[in-house]
Image (spheres, rainbow, N blue to C red):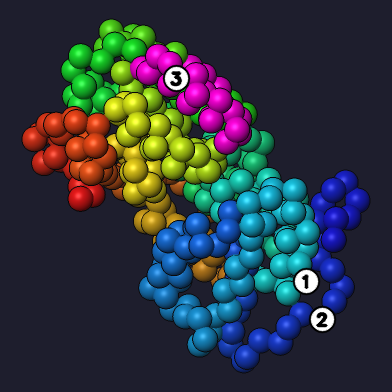
């Protein structure tokens, strides 16, 4: 239930019984669980490596708002009724879970948690939550550098993403600065929803850019198939920061290896189960990154992937 000042308070209801020695960890996501199953499975693997296995000493209680962010308070309240010892908030679900005060919260968040107001410091989290940020501003420079290697003659690039995503302005600034150094004109078009992405793609149908670069955020996650279809139809290379973009038909993705990061969240959960406070666990950034190329898409848009780039790719999707 939502108490005074909008804080989610623990309902005074009997929680479902746990077998002796079991602990309950909650997982909450905006997106349907089938869309984030790879991340949830990675978290399970991380827990198992630390000795917590479902059916033995762990109940992993995963809930979703099924794509409707307005349902998050209701979904989270339902989860709290089952008395988890720790809650993991995936992506934008953190903006509902941040109000929880009775249970420590771990986040896996693609934005800047300081700019988002989730904490005052990465080194010593100032609230009842900690976790990982997947944002690394310098990756935006690397993506454009890869784009130049892929398309040496590129001169016009459209950059799009959610303008209210915490840290987006830093990513745009870094991208523009790198584009200027490379002699590329980078046009920034903010798109705060899937509908706005579709409007942009309809506009670009008339005059396609040399490439379309999409910031890795929740709007990209929702729009990845639309962007990929546009790229193939207009023979326009498309790029973003998460592997799932390339898996959905985008030409290239370069960014954090998210499964590794979600495995790392298990470390936070176990430390909190052992009695650590969120303030004792600094917010971390990814340490493993991956370059994924989609050869099928390259063939569809009649683009030869450079041999040097193929050699460096972590995976080439056939």
Between 269 and 233, the one lying in front of the other is: 233
Q: Is residue 38 left or right of residue 6?
A: left
Q: Is residue 143 shown to the viewer in this render?
A: no
Q: Residues within 10 Å of mark 1 (few under 14, many from 20)?
A: some
Q: Residue at x 88, y 55 (%)?
A: 3
Q: Is residue 152 left or right of residue 241?
A: left
Q: Is residue 295 left or right of residue 68?
A: left
Whether label 2 touches label 1, CB < 8 Å: no
Between 149 and 255, the one lying in front of the other is: 149
Quarter occupied by residue 82? bottom right
Q: Mark 1 highlights which residue? A: 81
The furthest residue to the left: 307
Q: Mark 3 highlights which residue? A: 204
Q: Secondary structure at mark 2?
A: loop
Q: Secondary structure at mark 1?
A: loop
Q: Residues within 10 Å of mark 2 (few under 14, many from 20)?
A: few
Between 54 and 310, the one lying in front of the other is: 310
Which comes before the other along the chain, label 3 or label 2? 2
Q: Mark 2 highlights which residue? A: 14
Q: Nearer the viewer, mark 3 or mark 2?
A: 3
Rendered location of residue 277, percent (x, y): 62, 59
Q: CA distance from mark 2 to mark 1?
A: 8 Å
User: Which range is magenta?
Assistant: 188-209
Which comes before the other along the chain, label 1 or label 3? 1
Q: Is residue 229 above or below residue 98?
A: above
Rendered location of residue 15, percent (x, y): 76, 80
Rendered location of residue 203, percent (x, y): 49, 19
């Amino acid at each position: 239930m939502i108490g005074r000042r909008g804080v989610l308070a623990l309902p005074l209801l009997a929680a479902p019984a746990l077998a002796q020695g079991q602990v309950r960890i909650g997982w909450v996501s905006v997106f349907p669980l089938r869309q984030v199953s790879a991340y949830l499975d990675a978290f399970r693997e991380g827990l198992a490596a630390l000795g917590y296995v479902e059916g033995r000493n762990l109940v992993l209680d995963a809930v979703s708002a099924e794509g409707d962010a307005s349902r998050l308070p209701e979904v989270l309240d339902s989860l709290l009724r089952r008395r988890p010892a720790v809650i993991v908030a995936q992506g934008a679900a953190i903006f509902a879970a941040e109000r929880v005060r009775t249970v420590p919260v771990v986040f896996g968040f693609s934005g800047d948690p300081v700019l988002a107001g989730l904490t005052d410091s990465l080194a010593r989290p100032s609230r009842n939550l900690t976790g990982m940020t997947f944002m690394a501003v310098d990756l935006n420079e690397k993506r454009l550098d890869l784009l130049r290697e892929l398309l040496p003659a590129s001169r016009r690039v459209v950059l799009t993403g959610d303008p209210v995503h915490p840290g987006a302005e830093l990513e745009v600034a870094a991208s523009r600065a790198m584009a200027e150094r490379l002699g590329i004109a980078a046009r920034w078009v903010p798109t705060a929803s899937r509908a706005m992405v579709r409007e942009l793609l309809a506009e670009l149908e008339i005059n396609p850019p040399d490439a379309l670069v999409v910031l890795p955020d929740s709007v990209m996650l929702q729009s990845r198939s639309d962007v990929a279809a546009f790229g193939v139809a207009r023979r326009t290379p498309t790029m973003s920061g998460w592997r799932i973009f390339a898996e959905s038909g985008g030409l290239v993705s370069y960014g954090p290896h998210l499964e590794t990061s979600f495995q790392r969240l298990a470390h936070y959960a176990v430390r909190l189960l052992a009695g650590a406070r969120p303030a004792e666990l600094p917010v971390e950034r990814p340490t493993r990154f991956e370059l994924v190329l989609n050869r099928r898409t390259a063939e569809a848009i009649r683009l030869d992937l450079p041999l040097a780039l193929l050699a460096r790719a972590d995976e080439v999707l056939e």
